[in-house]
Image (spheres, helix red, strand yellow):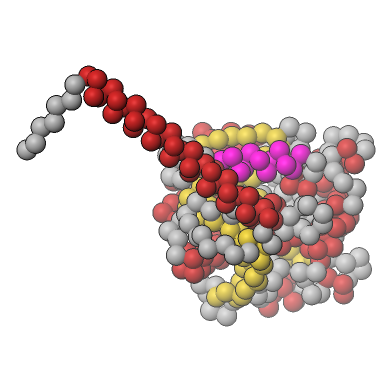
Amino acid sequence: MIKVICSPHMWSRFASAFSAWLTASSVLVGMLATSEVSNAQDAAIVKVDSQIDALDPGIKLFLREKMPQGNTRFANDNIVLFLHGATSPSSCDFDLQYKDYSWADWLVKRGYVVYMGDYRNYGGSTREKAMDEPASNNQPVTRSYLALRDVEAFVNHIKRTRGVQRISLIGWSWGAMMAGYYASLHNENVQKLILYAPLYNFNDHTNLGPGSGLQNKRKPMEFNFALGAYRLASEAANTGRWNGEIPVENKDEYRDPAVPAAFWNECLTTDPTSSSRSPASLRAPNGVLEDSFYQATGRPLWNAANIYAPTMVIGGNYDTWSFQEDRAGLMRELVHAPVKHDVLIEDATHFVLFEKKRFTFFEEVLKFLKE
């Protein structure tokens, strides 16, 4: 064994040199990161739409990939998968091509490789036979345990094709429930978990309107099993729900007046039968309504105590799907998450990603991703 003895003077010089090296290294890393972001902001965005195999035979799933042109970096910390909610598919939710409203493009310009996928019976994915029959002929389709298998297919595909071990999940609404459900079973695949507007365990739910099976806040809940396989969603219903959450008479104070129609028009293009009905409408599977009812009435699908990934819970203060009680329940039960953040966006609704506060919201999520 060799023993090295340093004088206090030598040790002081060594410590100073080491400190200077650490500082220079930190500056260099920061410069490289800044350079990457700058290059991403200047680069064109490349979009690739694919049909991948589901875990179940005969089902194909829509998956969109977006990244800066020329990107060669695929790592655990720069890949994000968006998971959509109960009614509309991923492309109009996260990649709305109206002005600067694409959250996907916003993240790509900050150096991320972004994916978004549609569960079965949504958007560009396979629609089962029940979706082409009268809704009353079948029970609710796309139950959460099946959508969970689709999330698994998305993650497996991304890991395999990009050679990474983990990815970050961002789920909105029911997508937040699915992201939490998946993470509770597959922590080894999750880099970071962002639960945007999750329903969790607050019994006084929710604002989906008459006949949904989930009644308005503070009223008893009942589930209507006669709902059938799917429901028809219209722009009027979607915008009406959104209007109901904005607490001022002039809704333009919260959003661009053209956004509701722009959003819904993009959603309608994902359903080839939408124009066959008057008014045009989107077929939306009802499995989410049945499972959300169970989740909100003491029969949870998953438990946040089984999540071991860093987790952010975020929502708007006027959201009537995800209440602050939901998010508080999640924070209490995220006992094994090494990091957990609860962020409330003031003067925002369930649709904050399309509102004037969206950049405040986006920046909070980005800050968590970069921690």
Which residue is rendered at x = 57% and y = 51% of the image? 36
Residue at the left extreme?
A: 1
In this view, the residue in front, 242 or 344, is: 344
Give the left or right position of residue 56, taking residue 239 as reference. Answer: left
In this view, the residue in front, 177 or 89, is: 89
Residue at the top extreme?
A: 8
The answer to whether one can see residue 141 in this image is: no
Estimate the x, y position of residue 339 in percent, counting from the top left. Answer: 48, 37
Number of disc labels: 0
Which residue is rendered at x = 85% and y = 52% of the image? 259
Give the left or right position of residue 184, taking residue 41 as reference. Answer: left
Estimate the x, y position of residue 276 in percent, counting from the top left. Answer: 87, 74
Magenta part of the chain: 357-369
- Quadrant (top left/top right/bottom left/bottom right) for the N terminus: top left
Magenta: main secondary structure equals helix
Examine the image and state in which quarter residue 59 appears.
bottom right
Estimate the x, y position of residue 293 in percent, counting from the top left. Answer: 64, 50
Estimate the x, y position of residue 325 in percent, counting from the top left. Answer: 63, 34
Q: Is residue 364 magenta?
A: yes
Which residue is rendered at x = 50% and y = 55% of the image? 167
Q: Is residue 45 magenta?
A: no
Which residue is rendered at x = 85% and y = 58% of the image? 262
Examine the image and state in which quarter residue 231 appears.
bottom right
Examine the image and state in which quarter residue 114 appears.
bottom right
In this view, the residue in front, 304 or 65, is: 65
The answer to whether one can see residue 41 in this image is: yes
Rendered position, 60 above or below 4: below
In this view, the residue in front, 212 or 264, is: 264
